[in-house]
Amino acid sequence: MRYGTQLDEDQSQLLFNLFFPGFGLIISGILIKIYALNDYSDIGSKPNPPWNHRWDP
């Protein structure tokens, strides 16, 4: 069952089909930046709390 006109259906299908390749493009750009350019600036690091000092007791 479809709601709306054929133009509405075509536009929603176009947007749906462009949605996933956009994510693929973004992910591939991030991977190229990390592995080819050795730039890890976009990866956030977890803060090291003061009680996690990693000393041996």
Image (cartoon, grey):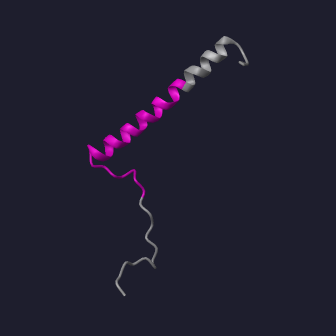
Q: Among all residues in the image, which is located at the extreme top?
A: 6
39 to 32, vertically: above or below: below
Position of residue 21 in the picture relative to residue 30 (left or right): right
50 to 2, vertically: above or below: below
Position of residue 2 in the picture relative to residue 14 (left or right): right
Q: Residue at x 42, y 56 (%)?
A: 44
Q: Residue at x 70, y 13 (%)?
A: 5
Q: Residue at x 66, y 17 (%)?
A: 8
Prevalent SS, magenta region: helix
Give the total number of marks visible in the rendering: 0
26 to 34, vertically: above or below: above
Q: Residue at x 58, y 21 (%)?
A: 13
Q: Among all residues in the image, which is located at the extreme front?
A: 1
Residue 7 occupies quadrant = top right
Q: Position of residue 57 (x, y in %)?
A: 37, 88
Q: Nearer the viewer, residue 39 or 31?
A: 31
Position of residue 3 in the picture relative to residue 48 (left or right): right
Q: Position of residue 32 (x, y in %)?
A: 31, 40
Q: Quadrant of the N terminus?
A: top right
Q: Position of residue 45 (x, y in %)?
A: 41, 60
Q: Among all residues in the image, which is located at the extreme bottom?
A: 57
Q: Tell me if residue 20 is in the magenta stretch.
A: yes
Q: Tell me if residue 28 is in the magenta stretch.
A: yes
Q: Which residues are magenta?
A: 17-44
Residue 53 occupies quadrant = bottom left
Q: Position of residue 27 (x, y in %)?
A: 41, 39
